Image (cartoon, rainbow, N blue to C red):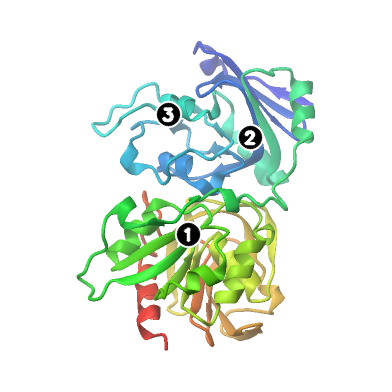
Amino acid sequence: MQSVDASPARRRVRGPAAALALEDGSVFRGTAFGAEGTSFGEAVFNTSMTGYQEVLTDPSYAGQIVIMTSPHQGNTGVNDDDAESSAMHLAGFAVREASRTAPSWRAEATVQQALAAAGVVAIEGIDTRRLTRLVRARGSMRAGVSTVDLDPASLVERVRATPGMAGADLATTAGTPTIVESAAIVGPATTARGRVLRVAAVDFGMKRNILRLMAAAGIEATVFPARTPPDDIARGGFDGVFLSNGPGDPSATTDGVAATRALLGTVPLFGICLGHQLLGIALGGRTFKMSFGHRGTNQPVLDVRSGRVEITSHNHGFAVDPAAWELRDGATAQTDHGRVVLSHRNLNDGTLEGMRCLDVPAFGVQYHPEAAPGPHDSRSLFDEFRTLMETAV
């Protein structure tokens, strides 16, 4: 077991002690700046330079302790307008240094205040660079962060007793528990595009900016809970179905897979992140757990169709396996629902980032074109969804 203390610069800051432990036995000592208590989850890192409030309020981070690689967080505070959901879902937060003030005219609270109010345990003053390198080298690990249990051996033992992310069905409880109209959340859809289209959005942990961009594309959504039976959706006479992002293992989200499979071919479908993974499984494919995943706003993705490279926002630890269909650039593959093509590929590690069905109206992307802080390279996908619904027979 290796224990790492806070740096000398951080020891000068007075505050409650906190510790972060990994299942490999590494322990980092720092200072608490959120809620008091102990929390467990999967340690992951995010490389974004901006957008910490999107990270904090993204339901896709449920069950995860997020390490921010950018050293200074909280500079502009938090506000209700920038929240991507009504709560913080992450298990814990780890940063090099948290801003003590929120010098922005839009700020309604500091990050410390928001974390404490949400009950999220957070730690600062640790060597996040070393911690990130550990996760990068050894893969995402079970972890715990505590302001109460500061004994290294005890905290590591408790971490090792917690379940991992593989097999975890977190998406079914991350979204809305009741049916809600998008207009009540983000306002009405624009009519500049002609007829307003109606979409059933299955909420596995959806971010609000998805609804904002749909509204801008002339699409209004009825948001359904994750376990809504497909017959209930089919009876609504919607122009399309959207499958949202969300947390957990896609193969464990069995209700979502079954609903996607039932709806394929009956209505145009668009999936983002977890929704894309559920589409892949419903087509007869499979997903796999990545070593440390993609989390950040700087992932280069090739649009195979146009040759255009887009910088994209990511937050996922699972991916669709193209080997299930021997899917590769420039070729079609046969699935349980007809032919499919690889539409987008990650230029860092070659993983599948998007696919489009040729015999049924459906497509999905692994990344987040709706990223509120940016980048915005891929926002045209919402227009593609509209076009798919307008042209589907």
Q: Which residue is mark 2?
A: 131
- As measured in the structure, the alpha-carbon distance from the residue carrying label 3 to the one carrying label 1 is 28 Å
| In this rendering, the label closer to the viewer, 2 or 1 | 1
| Position of residue 250 measured from the top left corner of the image (x, y, whole percent) | 64, 59
Measured along the vertical axis of the image, is residue 164 above or below residue 370?
A: above
Q: Name the residue: 61% across, 71% down.
A: 280
The amino acid type found where label 1 is placed reads Phe
Measured along the vertical axis of the image, is residue 160 above or below residue 266?
A: above
Instruction: Give the class, few, some or many, for how many residues have Cα within 10 Å of label 3's Cα (few <14, many ≥20).
Output: many
- Image marks 3 and 1: residues in contact by CB distance under 8 Å: no
Q: Quadrant of the C terminus?
A: bottom left
Name the quadrant containing residue 21: top right
Earlier in the chain: of badge 2 and badge 1, it is 2
Q: Which residue is mark 3?
A: 114
Q: 327 or 249: nearer the eye?
A: 249
Q: Quadrant of the N terminus?
A: top right
| In this rendering, the label closer to the viewer, 2 or 3 | 3
- As measured in the structure, the alpha-carbon distance from the residue carrying label 2 to the one carrying label 3 is 24 Å
| Lateral position of residue 339 relative to residue 24, left or right | left
Q: Name the residue: 33% across, 61% down.
A: 213
Q: Assign a secondary structure to mark 1.
A: strand
Q: Assign a secondary structure to mark 2.
A: helix
Instruction: Give the class, few, some or many, for how many residues have Cα within 10 Å of label 2's Cα (few <14, many ≥20).
Output: many
Q: Is residue 192 visible?
A: yes
Earlier in the chain: of badge 2 and badge 3, it is 3
- Which numbered marker is on residue 224? 1
Q: Name the residue: 80% across, 28% down.
A: 157
| Position of residue 267 measured from the top left corner of the image (x, y, whole percent) | 47, 79
Earlier in the chain: of badge 3 and badge 1, it is 3
- As measured in the structure, the alpha-carbon distance from the residue carrying label 2 to the one carrying label 1 is 38 Å
